[in-house]
Image: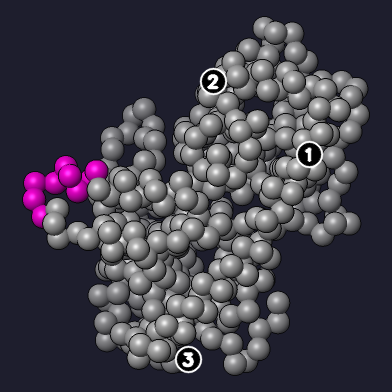
Amino acid sequence: MAVPDSAPTILAIDPFHGGSHRVFMQQVRKHSRFDWHVMTDKPVHWKWRSSHSPVSMSNSAQAWIEKHGQPDMVFCTDMLDLAAWAGLMRHSLSAVVPIVAYFHESQFTYPTSPDARVDLHYAYRNLLTALAAGKCWFNSAFHRDTFLRESDRLLAQMPDGRGDYDLEAVASKCRVIYPGFEPPPADDLPASRTSDDGPIHIGWVSRWEHDKRPDRLVSLCQELQSRGIPFRLVLLGNRPVREPEALRCIRMSYGHHIEHDGFAETSRAYWSMLAKMDVVLSTADHEFFGIAICEAVWAGAVPVLPDRLSYPELFPDACLYSTVDQAADLISRLTSVGFRQSKQAALRRQVERLQARRTVAELDEAIGRVIRSAVDDA
């Protein structure tokens, strides 16, 4: 979108500029009517990035303000320790400039790996960011509700001082604005599978990390095989440097079922892989939105998702399961191409409202209100 010279200026700070954070910011800059200036850092060493970002990002912001003047609004992601950053900016950033924190993630409920201990220090930083921000916007109602509930639970564990934290005031600042997804141009979207020939194609689009529970994909493959249901696997998703045990097991035991195994190098290749999927599967223990699931549904896949996390607010009950057996039941019914096609149109309409051009329009409307309110109060 062409931004006029007179458009209000948003100074955005994204210390962990990778994955869904990067995709979201690209979508915002493409569709927003505001003038965005984005400060970023590398998406590695997230704990250090969170600790270091107040210093590095305040240095960058101070230099930017010296050159360009005060922004109309500051927009930061949850990876910024906003309370520390705001303290470092006290001589540079005008007190009348509103600050919005956008929470892609929070550390209260992140599932720890088996060999890791729970560290609530970073969750407490998330809470301080919410206290310091003028507005707190979340990528799902599930995330917002979880954040508020777990903040209260965290403070209840502390030796004293619970009354110093006004969580009702935090709740009053909260709003849900979905990050959305960016569909490809219609001419670039490959046709989805329509043939009833051959096995059902099951897609995996999640990171291969413990919080996405790829071990449950192994269990599902075992269940489908025991039922005699033919299937093929389209395995996407970022892989860690150390190959997960679940992926090794799938390759060893179900290698003859694998249609594709690897990262898609280009957008066209990625959407081509999505179009091969009859079903897109999640087995996650941790998901605050699900951009890749929305993309797969737009490409024609029917989602088979856990009945928890952000999924119930985005998709109908008919797509949700509670156990691996129930997931296998759903997939068994979806082996019929007629049954799949009866679901596809409605599901596409379900995610159409989540296209980036629509979610960014909602974001712009909310930003406009914040800026106007700040001007009125000045």
| Rendered image: mark on residue 68 | 3
Q: Residue at x 55, y 35 (%)?
A: 208
Q: Which residues are magenta?
A: 153-161
Q: Which residue is mark 1?
A: 344
Q: Determine which quarter of the picture holds residue 125.
A: bottom left
Q: Which residue is mark 2?
A: 323
Label 2, label 3: how many angstroms apart (C-alpha)? 55 Å
Three-letter residue code for mark 2:
Thr
For the C terminus, give its image quadrant: bottom left
Q: Is residue 292 above or below residue 164?
A: above
**Secondary structure beneath disc 2?**
loop
Label 2, label 1: how many angstroms apart (C-alpha)? 23 Å
Label 3, label 1: how many angstroms apart (C-alpha)? 49 Å
Query: Which circle's residue, 3 or 1, is located before the other in the chain?
Result: 3
Closer to the camera: disc 2 or disc 3? 2
Q: Is residue 81 visible?
A: no
In the image, residue 297 lies in the stretch drawn in magenta: no
